[in-house]
Structures are given as C-alpha cells and as structure tokens.
Image (cartoon, rainbow, N blue to C red):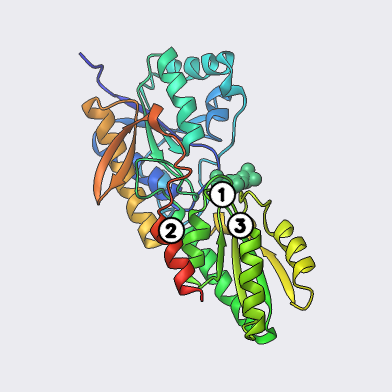
C-alpha cells in the first residue's frame, strides 16, 4: 500500500526557464486544494542540502504567473552528485515529514532525482523545464516557446540593420546540446543557414553557397548558429568566413542569456500550469518517479530514468525546408 502524500516539497534546478514560476504556482495551489502542505526549497538541491526550506501557502505564489526566473531560485548543485549530499537532503525532508518531491528542471536534475529515489524512500516527480527543449518524450518543455520568441524578436531587429548595410550576420543562440532554438528561430526569421549540434556543419558547402549568392548580388545573409554547434559557435564561423569571403561585410551577435529571461509566453504559462497540476495529481495517485510531459496534447508520464537528451532527433524534413526556403 502506497503511503499517503501529506507534505510536498518543490524546487527548481539547473538553468532557469520562463514559466517555472507558473509551474511553482500550479504545484502550490493544487497541493493546497487537496489539503496537502507544501514547502518551497530554495536554490534546487543546494537548498535541500542546506535546509533552506520554507512552508508555502496559496498567497506565496500570488502575482508570479507572468514573471520570468524562479522565485525559488535555482542552482546546479555538485554536492547532490555525492551520496553524502543526498543523505543530508533526505534528512532535511524527513525532519519536516515531506513525503513527495516535485523537481522542475532538465535532464540533469532528473538524473539526480533518479539516484535520490533509489537510495531513499521519497517519491519524486519531474516537470520538464528548460529553454533547450532537449528532453526526449515531451513535445514541450517550459520556457522553450518564450526563448524562441525572444530570439525571433532580436533577430528581426538585427535583420533591419543587416539589410540596410548588405551584410552577412552570424547570430548565436543558446543550445549547448540541442539545436531547437536555432532551428525554430532560424526558420521563423528566414535564415539562409542554420547550424546545429545534431548535424555536422559542412563549412565548404556553406562557403560555396555564399560565394554563389555574392555573384548574384544577394549580399544579405543570415546565419543562425546554436552555441553547441560542432564548428565552435559564431566566432569560429566568423573567422573562417572572413578568410574565405574577403569582400563580404560580416558581423556577429551572440544573444546569450537574454533568451532565458522575460515574461513567459502564453503557451509556456499554459503548459507550466498543466504540468504543475498533473505533477501533484500524480503524486497523489501513486504515479511516482516519472516526469510530466505532453505528447500530441495529452499528458505523458515518462520514467525519470528515461529522461535523456533528444540529441540527433531533429527531423530531416526541417533541414530540407531550410534549404529550399533559403535560396
Ligand atoms: O540549459 C539551458 C542553457 O541555457 C543552455 O542553452 C546553455 O548552454 C546553458 O543553459 C548556460 O548555462 P549557464 O547559465 O549556467 O551558463
């Protein structure tokens, strides 16, 4: 017989993503609705180890659904990789009688939860929160839509000045292991080339096509590069292009952490609310050690240990569309 969930802890871990606050709000208010006590854990697993934990109520999450970042703060906690760190974390949960844990984060945070769940008697539920959308098993991760829209807005602005000066622009977007932000923002802004970690960059092919465009006076060219592209990011691409296209005017812009902030989009608020609600429902019905995802607009519960990066899964059709539309 499963133990009744009476006290839930919630934390955000890893890189923050817009919509995490909406997810916290949903977890807190669904718990309160069910008469379950709920505790906010500060700075992810770090706060769990350091006992930085406070009780939350419905009002604790007022006026946050529209805010980026995370009111619980976040961290990438090395100590939690060690058994000693996890033991301290468990002791802090135990002393408060917390018997369910909601982890809002990416695959790294979920891997921590798997180990924790194996060693200690604490049911864990993950909520997929990362701007990179690099977790297999869910069509959405909280923050991706906002990050892509931020990138699109910035690239549109760059396009104005790029066009005015007949320049080549190389814009680097986030995505250490995954190219979804680059692919989606690149397609949406009409990029001529999109370089992503999932595919080997064919620099010779890109140079040949830029030279051909130069011959026919198509001088405005947008290249969107994911930071984790195998060629080494925007600065490396610039070095090579400057050498091979001496007549071209080339500029670089690295968008960086601007993509992680800002008010979450409507989609991110919706999926965060839905996932937060279902995370608590799952704990209650005994569906443990899974993370909450959405596939084909239906809730999906994927074992935490299957939360692997979706590297290499970008569809060939997208790549073809980029090529055809960029001519
Ligand atoms: O995981 C999200 C992400 O934004 C990646 O795209 C990026 O490489 C990384 O986090 C940056 O992390 P940090 O803010 O710790 O430098």
Do the CB atoms of the residues marked 2 and 1 lie less than 8 Å apart? no
Residue 263 visible in image: no
**238 over 69 or under it: above or below:** below
**320 over 39 or under it: above or below:** below
Rendered image quadrant of residue 66 = bottom left
Considering only order in the chain, which callout, 1 or 3, is on the residue closer to the N terminus? 1
Residue 224 in the figure: left or right of residue 30: right
Q: Position of residue 261 (x, y in %)?
A: 55, 56
Foreground of the two, 305 or 34:
305
Query: Can you identify the residue that label 1 sits on?
Result: 197
Give the class, few, some or many, for how many residues have Cα within 10 Å of label 1's Cα (few <14, many ≥20).
Answer: many
Residue 294 in the figure: left or right of residue 192: left
Considering only order in the chain, which callout, 3 or 2, is on the residue closer to the N terminus? 2
Query: Can you identify the residue that label 3 sits on?
Result: 202
Disc 3 element: loop
- Separation of marks 2 and 1 at Cα, in angstroms: 19 Å
Residue 235 is labelled as none
């Amino acid at each position: 017989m499963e133990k009744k969930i009476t006290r839930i802890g919630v934390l955000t871990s890893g890189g923050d993503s817009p919509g995490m606050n909406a997810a916290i709000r949903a977890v807190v208010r669904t718990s309160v609705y069910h008469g379950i006590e709920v505790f906010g854990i500060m700075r992810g697993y770090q706060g769990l180890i350091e006992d930085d934990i406070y009780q939350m109520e419905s009002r604790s999450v007022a006026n946050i659904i529209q805010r980026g970042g995370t009111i619980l703060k976040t961290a990438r906690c090395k100590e939690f990789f060690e058994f000693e760190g996890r033991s301290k974390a468990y002791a802090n949960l135990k002393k408060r009688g917390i018997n369910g844990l909601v982890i809002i984060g990416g695959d790294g945070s979920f891997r921590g939860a798997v180990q924790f769940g194996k060693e200690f008697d604490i049911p864990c539920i993950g909520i997929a929160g990362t701007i990179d959308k690099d977790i297999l098993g869910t069509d959405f991760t909280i923050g991706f839509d906002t990050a892509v829209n931020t990138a699109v807005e910035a690239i549109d602005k760059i396009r104005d000045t790029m066009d005015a000066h007949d320049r080549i622009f190389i814009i680097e977007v986030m995505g250490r292991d995954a190219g979804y932000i680059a692919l989606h923002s690149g397609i949406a802004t009409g990029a001529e080339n999109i370089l992503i970690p999932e595919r080997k960059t064919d620099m010779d092919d890109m140079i040949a096509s830029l030279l051909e465009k130069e011959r026919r006076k198509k001088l405005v060219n947008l290249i969107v590069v994911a930071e984790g592209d195998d060629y080494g990011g925007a600065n490396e691409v610039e070095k090579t292009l400057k050498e091979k296209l001496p007549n071209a005017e080339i500029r670089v812009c690295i968008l960086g952490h601007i993509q992680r902030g800002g008010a979450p989009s409507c989609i991110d608020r919706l999926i965060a609310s839905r996932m937060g609600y279902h995370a608590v429902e799952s704990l209650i019905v005994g569906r443990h050690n899974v993370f909450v995802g959405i596939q084909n607009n239906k809730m999906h519960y994927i074992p935490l240990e299957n939360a692997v990066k979706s590297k290499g899964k970008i569809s060939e059709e997208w790549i073809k569309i980029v090529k055809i539309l960029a001519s």
